[in-house]
Amino acid sequence: MHPKNLHNSPYQFKELIEKHSALETFVFKNQYGNKTIDFANQLAVIALNKALLKLHYNISSWDIPENYLCAPIPGRADYIHYIADIVAKENIQEPIKGLDIGVGANCIYPILGSQIYNWQMVGSDINTVAVESATKNVNANSNLVDKIDIRHQKDNANIFSGIIKPNEKFHFTMCNPPFHASKKEATKGTMRKLKNLGLKKNNLELNFGGIANELWCNGGEALFLKRLIKESVLFKNNVTFFTSLVSKSENLPKLEKQLTKLKATHFIVPMEQGNKKSRILVWRF
């Protein structure tokens, strides 16, 4: 993990339970005698997230609708810290402003960005329930209301258009795109996760959560990112750095070729959380 990520050390379950007592129900000792939770149980992960947000990020109230993606906070914090490194090199004097494409019902990236670095954040999503939930999470915490703006993308054909206002400036955009190209592919991915955890579960939605636009879209990650890059050209004067997570390394060559063709400067930032490897694609015009 990023050296500034406070989740580099094991979870402090005693302190977390003191902040959010409901977590205690899900905590147990594993075969090595260490306290943990069942990370395949969405309710357990939600309880852990609530405790982490209360203990470390001064968020008193947070929740998501049933079956929506419950984002693990440590990995999300990593993305935020790496963006901070990128932006810091610009020696920007004014308040930093970022845009999270596909904010989701959880609103985790804007929350972390505002609470860790005091950034101004905008979160956009095409799903109305996600927008309503993200807005509710913001309004439930007085320390977020003036820092986070949630916007609804009403046009399936657009990503930035309709969200970035004329003459509006962002120091960065970020995105955690849908991984899969279909529900079938997403289900296979979930089954691999369950197998890696050594668990057998029947109700996939209950365990990992995630609705269609969060987990899959036509063409999967590769096509979504091609669209994102293509549309970013139209907003090159509005945004300093465009960024996105890329989960599948095999997608990188074509994306880099597209960026080169568009005369965009680009680079890749590797990310690792335990056994999970990912990377951030960064570009600018």
Image (cartoon, rainbow, N blue to C red):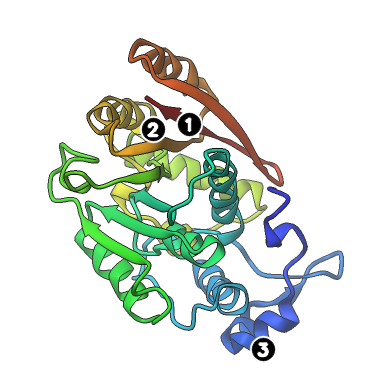
Q: Determine the residue positioned at 24% across, 30% down.
A: 231
Which numbered marker is on residue 18? 3
Spatial separation of the CA atoms under disc 3 and disc 1: 39 Å
Reading the chain from its start, which is encountered first: label 2 or label 1?
Answer: 2
Can you give x and y, in whole percent of width and height, for residue 140 in the image?
36, 81
At label 1, which amino acid type do we have? Answer: Val
Q: Are marks 3 and 2 in contact (CB under 8 Å)?
A: no
Which badge, 3 or 1, comes first in the chain's sequence?
3
Judge from the rendering whether residue 37 lies leftward or rightward of residue 194; answer left or right: right
Q: Measured from the top left, where is residue 16 in percent x and y? A: 66, 80
Residue indicated by mark 2: 221
- Quick one: which residue is furthest to the right in this view? 32
Per the model, the C-alpha gap separating discs 2 and 1 is: 16 Å
Badge 3: how crowded within 10 Å, few (<14), some, or many (20+)? few
Of residues 43 and 90, the one nearer the viewer is: 90
Task: Kindly indicate the quadrant of the structure image that contains residue 209.
Answer: bottom left
Q: Are marks 3 and 1 in contact (CB under 8 Å)?
A: no
Give me the residue at 56% from left, 73% from top: 57
Is 208 positioned to the left or the right of 192 in the image? left
Q: Amino acid at mark 2?
A: Glu
Residue 116 drawn above or below residue 175: below
**Residue linked to disc 1:** 282
Pointer 2 local density, CA inside 10 Å: few below 14, some 14–19, many at least 20: many
Q: Quadrant of residue 242?
A: top left
Residue drawn at point x = 44 percent, y = 37 percent: 243
In the image, which is nearer the foreground, mark 3 or mark 1? Answer: 1
Circle on res. 134: none
Q: CA distance from mark 3 to mark 2?
A: 40 Å
